[in-house]
Amino acid sequence: MEFIPFAEAKKLDHHQVIGVDCFLPGRLNLSHWRGAGPPAELAEDTSAAIAINALVKGAVPEAARFVTNNHFDVDGFIGIWSLLNPELALKHQHLLKAMALLGDFRELPEDAALADQALKLVAWLNSVEKKKFYAPFGKAYLEEEACVEKYTFFLPAFEKALNDPEVFRKDWEEEYQLANQHLSLLASQGSVEFYEDIRLLVVHAPMPLHYYALFGKSAQTDMVLTIYPGNQFELEYKYTTWVDAYGRNPYPRINFQLLIEKLNGLETTGEKWTGADVTDTGPILRLGPSIKDKEIRFDHPFNRRFYSSSIAPELLENTVISFYRKACQSTKPKEIWTWAEIRQVNDNLMKTWKK
């Protein structure tokens, strides 16, 4: 098998090509993208895990000669690399799945040694990607074409890093150390509380953090509310609620609009609360102008500007919790949601609450 650009893959017969971490109509998609529909026996929460499961179960079609993706990220890369290097992928499958989980969902595995290995390798991919090419979503309008050079570089280079990450310490050490420092900072000076009934994680942190620290222990949640000093807040839907992340049983995403109206009614600074639509990969609700640049939204919170609210932290937290408890009364969590179902849930809420 070999990697080919997405535009070329679309021209091939359906039996010749596999789409990984994307949706290629009429072809086999080893992908968690909503509606991509991988075979049920292969389903898992990341695309890389689905691709590795296909190797484990011998489910890669013999006629498939090519593999493709329309963007570059850790999950998609690991899935494609695994199909091109099946023996190594099977040997390192637990580490590769942990890398995909960290890269895509920003979650750390429970096993400390595995988490450490995954963090080094993901930090290597992240750092080299930014230095040699461009940051994620830095060329969003050209991504389908621009990502090809990343695959061309990383696919042959990854095996050496996988076998001996220490060789590349100069590339990954800065991000690795920063993520670990922020994990320690959160453990020593912050607090975390999980509201299971609405699948919300509330994080009190002393400063904006690296995402791998902020979301590291968020596997059971759909949303993360972060409360920083100076009445600075963010509420974010996790990417797990954009894809078909099998086994998680999320609630449907609820449009921020009704909550924004409540918060703007409490806000006295003159700034307005804003939030992205539910169809965004990771909608963020925050005070101040909406962040339209996806590269900035995807970047770590410590690289974003925050505005101080007039709303006290306790009131903000209670308002968010009360809002979602009310919103979740009319529905139940389940494994897979279609966009049509999510729109219907939100339409019903808008009609009910506007009365």
Image (spheres, rainbow, N blue to C red):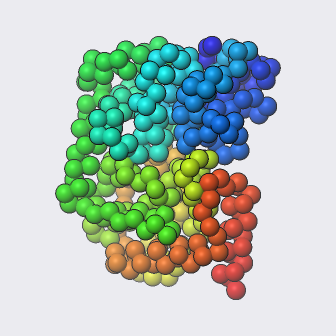
Residue lying furthest bottom: 355
Kindly identify the residue that appears in the image at 57 percent across and 67 percent down: 256
Q: Can residue 264 be seen here?
A: no
- Give the quadrant of the C terminus: bottom right
Q: Quadrant of residue 255?
A: bottom right
Q: In which quarter of the image is residue 39?
A: top right
Q: Which of 150 and 110 is in front in this view?
A: 110
Q: Nearer the viewer, residue 228 or 199?
A: 199
Q: Which of 136 and 330 is in front in this view?
A: 330
Kindly identify the residue that appears in the image at 47 percent across and 73 percent down: 320
Q: In this view, does 170 lie to the left or right of 47?
A: left
Q: In this view, does 298 lie to the left or right of 109?
A: right
Residue 37: where, in percent of width, then height? Answer: 70, 40
Kindly identify the residue that appears in the image at 54 percent across and 32 percent down: 48
Q: Nearer the viewer, residue 163 or 321?
A: 163
Residue 137: where, in percent of width, then height? Answer: 52, 39
- Give the quadrant of the N terminus: top right
Residue 75 vertical placement versus 329 (above, below) = above
